[in-house]
Image (spheres, rainbow, N blue to C red):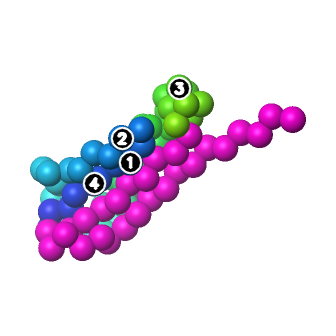
């Protein structure tokens, strides 16, 4: 099945191409990979601090949402 990975960080990017996966476990791994790539750039965590990846299927139904948030409190 084809899955689409929409990304909200500074801007919203709608996936119009998608990727084929055999199982939801593989979809979850791809979503986690995309979130971890975002977090691997230190400037993203300082300026934006969050990424939301919404995964849709062929029928445009949301099957998964991954949120990664970095919050820093300086006292």
Q: Which mark is residue 73?
A: none
Label 1: element kind: strand
Tell me if residue 47 comes above or below residue 11 in the rendering: above
Whether residues under marks 1 and 2 lie with C-beta atoms below 8 angstroms apart, the answer is: yes
**Residue placed under numbered mark 1 in the picture:** 8
User: Distance between the Cα atoms at labels 1 and 2?
Assistant: 6 Å
Q: Earlier in the sequence, mark 1 or mark 3?
A: 1
Mark 4–mark 1 distance (CA, rounded to whole Å) = 10 Å
Q: Residues within 10 Å of mark 3 (few under 14, many from 20)?
A: few
State which quarter of the image contains the C terminus: top right
Spot occupied by residue 52 in the image (x, y as percentages of width and height): 43, 53
Side of 42 relative to 59 (left or right): right
User: Camera-side residue: 20 or 7?
Assistant: 7
Name the side, left or right, on which 69 lies relative to 41.
right
- Nearer to us: label 4 or label 2: 2
Q: Nearer the viewer, residue 49 or 11?
A: 11
Q: Is residue 58 above or below residue 7?
A: below
**Quadrant of residue 31 within the rendered picture:** bottom left
- The label number, if any, that marks residue 11 in the structure image: 2
Range shown magenta: 49-75
Residue at position x 38%, y 48% from top? 8
Real-space Cα separation, disc 2 to disc 3, in angstroms: 15 Å
Q: Secondary structure at mark 2?
A: loop
Query: Cβ–Cβ below 8 Å for labels 1 and 3?
Result: no
State yes or no: residue 67 in magenta: yes
Residue that label 3 marks:
43
């Amino acid at each position: 099945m084809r899955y689409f990975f929409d990304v909200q960080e500074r801007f919203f990017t709608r996936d119009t191409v998608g990727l084929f996966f055999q199982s939801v476990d593989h979809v979850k791994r791809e979503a986690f990979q995309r979130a971890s790539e975002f977090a691997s750039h230190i400037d993203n965590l300082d300026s934006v601090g969050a990424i939301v990846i919404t995964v849709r299927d062929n029928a445009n139904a949301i099957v998964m949402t991954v949120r990664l948030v970095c919050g820093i409190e300086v006292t």
